[in-house]
Image (tube, grey):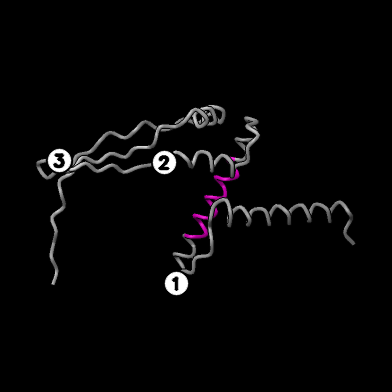
């Protein structure tokens, strides 16, 4: 016979597990993907697990810094910062490539500061020569 305390602990564990699956499905958008190879299935599970760990870590940061936001809210807000690949052709056939993120708004900067995060520096531009086209028949 299980005591009420053990039953309650088991119930709370069940609630946490169900919440984990809801997080994987909704917040992280990890839907079932039907793989054919065992190594791809294992890789999908590993990536899903790592994403979940990062989600939980973000929840812990939120609690520590008392942002009052859920991890979902933080991800939605920071998801407004876009990453862009800019390609500018040069007159000599080369191409200037730059990876850039959009300028964060004040709300983003405040949230990043409150969490103790900083955005990385913008990557320097790169100049690329065009790749030769190889025709196959």
Toward which corner of the image does residue 66 lie, by quadrant? top right
The earlier-in-sequence mark between 3 and 1 is 1
Query: Can you give x and y, in whole percent of width and height, for residue 29 in the image?
Result: 53, 55
Tag 1's secondary structure? loop
Residue at point 52% right, 30% down? 107
Quote the CA–CA distance across marks 3 and 2.
Answer: 25 Å
Residue at point 59% right, 44% down? 72
Quote the CA–CA distance across marks 2 and 1.
Answer: 33 Å
In the image, is residue 50 part of the stretch drawn in magenta? yes
Q: Residues within 10 Å of mark 3 (few under 14, many from 20)?
A: few
Span colored in magenta:
44-58
Query: Can you give x and y, in whole percent of width and height, for residue 137 in the image?
Result: 13, 72
Above or below residue 17? Residue 41 is: below
Q: Main secondary structure of the magenta part?
A: helix
Which mark is drawn over residue 82? 2
Label 3: which residue?
90
Residue nearest the observer in this picture, 26 or 80: 80
Label 1: which residue?
36
Toward which corner of the image does residue 98 lie, by quadrant? top left
In the image, is residue 113 part of the stretch drawn in magenta? no
Which mark is drawn over residue 107? none
Q: Which quadrant is home to the N terminus?
A: bottom right
Tag 3's secondary structure? loop
Residue nearest the observer in this picture, 2 or 76: 76
Left/right of residue 50 with respect to residue 137 in the rendered view: right
Residue at point 60% right, 35% down? 61
Q: Residues within 10 Å of mark 1 (few under 14, many from 20)?
A: few
Query: Can you give x and y, in whole percent of width and height, for residue 14 in the image?
Result: 73, 57
Q: Are marks 3 and 1 in contact (CB under 8 Å)?
A: no
Above or below residue 31? Residue 97 is: above
């Amino acid at each position: 016979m299980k005591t009420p305390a053990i039953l309650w602990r088991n119930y709370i564990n069940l609630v946490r597990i169900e919440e984990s699956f809801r997080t994987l499905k909704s917040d992280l958008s990890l839907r079932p993907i039907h793989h054919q190879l065992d190594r791809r299935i294992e890789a999908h599970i590993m990536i899903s697990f790592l994403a979940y760990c990062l989600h939980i870590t973000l929840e812990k940061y939120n609690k520590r810094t008392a942002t009052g936001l859920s991890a979902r809210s933080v991800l939605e807000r920071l998801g407004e910062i876009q990453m862009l690949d800019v390609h500018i052709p040069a007159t000599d056939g080369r191409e200037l490539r730059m990876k850039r993120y959009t300028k964060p708004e004040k709300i983003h900067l405040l949230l990043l500061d409150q969490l103790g995060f900083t955005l990385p520096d913008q990557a320097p531009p790169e100049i690329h020569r065009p790749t030769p086209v190889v025709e196959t028949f």
